[in-house]
Image (cartoon, rainbow, N blue to C red):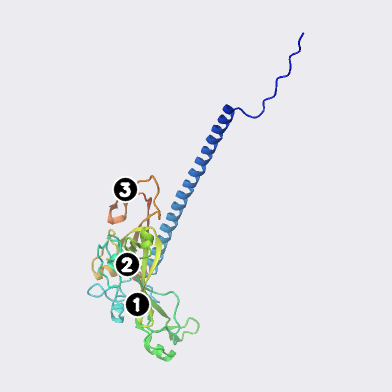
């Protein structure tokens, strides 16, 4: 009987087996690439959302803190009557600034062309509110070492003084200018009341973060303008008082503020919130503010279309924008502590 020989071992892979292995490998690679791509997209969207949340909350906190400090002039006192007409928010003259002290908060209700001398219309996003806050720094200056050209305010229970430092004064010169006194807490003797640097802050939304030249246009921010919360700050340079622009928070697309007006002098809003108290007397009675912010992603999201409608307080609704930016509304109600507390004394 013949003994069958051993079958020869297969050497390598057949063409069919090789093609099957390649196909399986490509399928696994495609799946892996899909996972990596989706993970990258998810991370990118999560990062955009995180930045939006951070920016929205920061902007809201910044404005809330500013409103809480509005009307701080160094002490509790009667500010007197409001001026007969609304003061020029861009003025840098002592007389106008002093007359505006009874209006710690002032605003412009979603203007399309503000027409302000300190703000180019092209640098303001049409239809967004402008908030003006007048207050002193929380850090007192030193008599005899006050900064040239800067405005200072001194307040006690007797009244308030706002003056400009026009020269390098000695302590005695400054005491002669800022005459208000207070009693020392220890021995009861009279001493000069603290003197605080005075400033005005103007908050507004600009169509861009970094203007092309001096104004926002289509070439700003590298050709993709980013709406940004800005602040104009009353400060000084070598020649005198001036306005300094400060970009604060990118991605803030809408600012709408509702005001609570105290008509009976008890320190609390009397009726419904309004978008514009209208008169100087009305603005002097503002004791609370409801801040409404619409924040958007800095960059668009592929495949997204914003069809939402957003409610911004008494202003009403905005949208849908029908673009690729994701948005969110942030709102809070803030008490203007200084004007409110003065009415409760």
Task: Note whether 103 is above or below 46 in the view shown.
Answer: below
Reading the image, the residue beneath label 1 is: 242
Q: Nearer the viewer, residue 236 or 94?
A: 236
For the residues carrying marks 1 and 3, which lies nearer the camera in this image? Answer: 3
- Tell which circle, 2 or 1, labels the residue nearer the N-terminal end: 2
- Tell which circle, 3 or 2, labels the residue nearer the N-terminal end: 2
Which mark, by number, is residue 215? 2
Q: Nearer the viewer, residue 172 or 89?
A: 89
Marker count (numbered): 3
CA–CA distance in space, label 1 to label 3: 40 Å
Residue 320: percent from the left, percent from the top? 30, 49
Residue 240: percent from the left, percent from the top? 35, 82
Residue 286: percent from the left, percent from the top? 31, 66
- Tell which circle, 1 or 3, labels the residue nearer the N-terminal end: 1
Residue 7: percent from the left, percent from the top? 70, 20
Q: Nearer the viewer, residue 131 or 161?
A: 131
CA–CA distance in space, label 2 to label 1: 18 Å
Label 1's element? strand
Asked whether the residues under the numbered discs 1 and 3 touch, taking CB atoms below 8 Å apart as contact, a structural biologist would say no
Left or right of 235, for residue 121: left
């Amino acid at each position: 009987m013949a003994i069958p020989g051993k079958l020869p071992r297969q050497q390598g892979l057949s063409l069919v087996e090789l093609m099957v292995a390649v196909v399986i490998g490509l399928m696994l690679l495609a799946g892996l690439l899909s996972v990596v791509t989706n993970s990258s997209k998810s991370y990118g969207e999560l990062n955009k959302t995180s930045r939006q949340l951070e920016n929205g909350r920061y902007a809201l906190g910044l404005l809330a803190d500013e409103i809480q400090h509005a009307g701080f002039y160094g002490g509790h006192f009667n500010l007197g009557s409001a001026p007969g007409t609304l003061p020029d928010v861009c003025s840098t003259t002592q007389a106008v600034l002093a007359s505006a002290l009874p209006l710690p908060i002032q605003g412009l209700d979603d203007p399309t062309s503000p027409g302000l001398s300190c703000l180019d219309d092209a640098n303001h996003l049409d239809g967004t509110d402008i908030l003006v806050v007048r207050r002193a720094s929380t850090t007192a200056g030193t008599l005899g070492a006050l900064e040239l050209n800067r405005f200072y305010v001194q307040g006690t229970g007797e009244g308030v003084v706002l003056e400009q430092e026009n020269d390098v004064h000695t302590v005695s010169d400054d005491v002669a200018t800022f005459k208000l006194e207070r009693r020392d807490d220890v021995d009861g003797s009279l001493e000069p009341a603290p003197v605080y640097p005075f400033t005005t802050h103007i908050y507004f939304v600009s169509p861009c973060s970094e203007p092309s030249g001096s104004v926002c246009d289509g070439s700003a921010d590298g050709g993709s303008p980013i709406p940004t919360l800005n602040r104009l700050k009353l400060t000084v340079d070598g020649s005198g008082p001036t306005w300094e622009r400060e970009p604060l928070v990118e991605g803030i697309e809408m600012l709408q503020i509702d005001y609570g007006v105290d008509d009976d002098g008890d320190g609390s809003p009397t009726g419904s919130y309004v978008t514009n108290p209208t008169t100087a007397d009305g603005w002097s009675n503002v004791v609370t503010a409801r801040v409404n912010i619409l924040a958007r992603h800095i960059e668009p999201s592929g495949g997204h279309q914003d069809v939402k409608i957003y409610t911004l307080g008494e202003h009403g609704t905005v949208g849908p924008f029908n673009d690729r930016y994701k948005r969110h509304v942030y709102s809070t109600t803030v008490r203007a502590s200084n004007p409110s507390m003065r009415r409760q004394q």
